Image: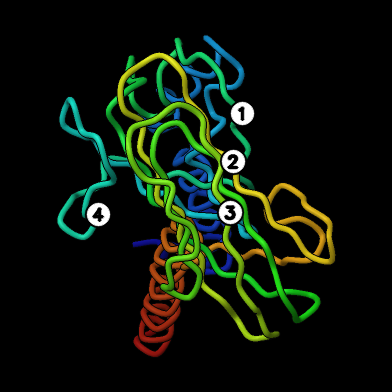
Amino acid sequence: MKKIYVNPLGISFLLIIASFIFTRCKDSTPEKIQTDKTNDIKKDSLAFGDINWVSNGLMGKVYLLAENTNALPDFDTMKPVNTLYTTTLNVPTRNWESGFPGLVNRFEWFAIEYKGNFKVKNTGHYTFRLVSDDGSKLFIDKKLVIDNDGGHPTTSRTGEIDLDNSLHSITVQYFQGPRYEIALQLFAGFNKEEEIFPGKYIELSTPGHNPHSMWLIFVLIIVLLLIIYIYSKKKKEDKAY
């Protein structure tokens, strides 16, 4: 019988190409397609974030609320229905008619809890301003800085905190009650300057790791194991002859 030679390098190359195609296909999941359809209806329908991971932003967990909810829920007791990523919170007051990203025809009775990490470029006294319709809260290093909770039209609240050059955590909790208006903006102020968070004095980083990269790591490990297996099998066959 004629011996068939299998080139392990060629196989590994094909497997790496396959893993690349696999990870790219992850972006065509029903969740992604659903969000894109919403975005086609109205461009700003992704104002609260997108499902695509970012390295320099906030990770937001989306929750569904019971009708007539009039305050922020206890997020620790709830299960999220979606995850969004955004580099800023800048949704001025607007009518909401096209639905919420990742939730078809949903534009009321939902909540988001955003989390992130940041460092300040200059240590000192910082002022934050949180604008929302309906309720919202701002926590820095798990300390409540702004309480803007409750069902209300667009309302602005401010808070102040001293920040050093260590890594700080930030949490923004927000809920949307009944239709029709919606708003969420976070401002940061330093040295008498106010900008949309994070601004030029703050460096923001997304907590955790890119969820899609875990798939790539898994596939590459499988590829490596296959290469080792093929190579060792070939050596045994060579010795047998």
Of labels 4 and 2, earlier in sequence is 4
Image x and y of residue 52, in percent = 53, 43
Mark 3 in CB contact with mark 1 (< 8 angstroms):
no
The answer to whether residue 49 of the structure is visible from this angle is: no
Who's the residue at 49% across and 66% down the image?
207
Who's the residue at 16% across and 31% down the image?
66
Q: Seen in the image, is 171 located left or right of residue 63?
A: right
Image x and y of residue 98, in percent = 45, 12
Q: Residues within 10 Å of mark 2 (few under 14, many from 20)?
A: some
The amino acid pointed to by label 3 is Thr
Q: Quadrant of the N terminus?
A: bottom left
Of labels 2 and 3, earlier in sequence is 3
The amino acid pointed to by label 1 is Pro
The amino acid pointed to by label 2 is Gln
Image x and y of residue 151, in percent = 33, 33
Callout 4 secondary element: helix
Q: Give the quarter of the image for residue 142.
A: bottom left
Image x and y of residue 155, in percent = 51, 35
Of labels 3 and 1, earlier in sequence is 1
Mark 1 in CB contact with mark 4 (< 8 angstroms):
no
Marker disc for residue 158: 3
The residue pinned by badge 1 equals 92
Query: CA gap, disc 2 to disc 3?
Result: 12 Å
Depth-wise, is mark 4 or mark 3 nearer the camera? 3
Callout 3 secondary element: strand
Marker disc for residue 75: 4
The residue pinned by badge 2 equals 185
Query: CA gap, disc 4 to disc 2?
Result: 20 Å
Who's the residue at 55% across and 62% down the image?
206
Q: Residues within 10 Å of mark 3 (few under 14, many from 20)?
A: some
Of labels 1 and 2, earlier in sequence is 1
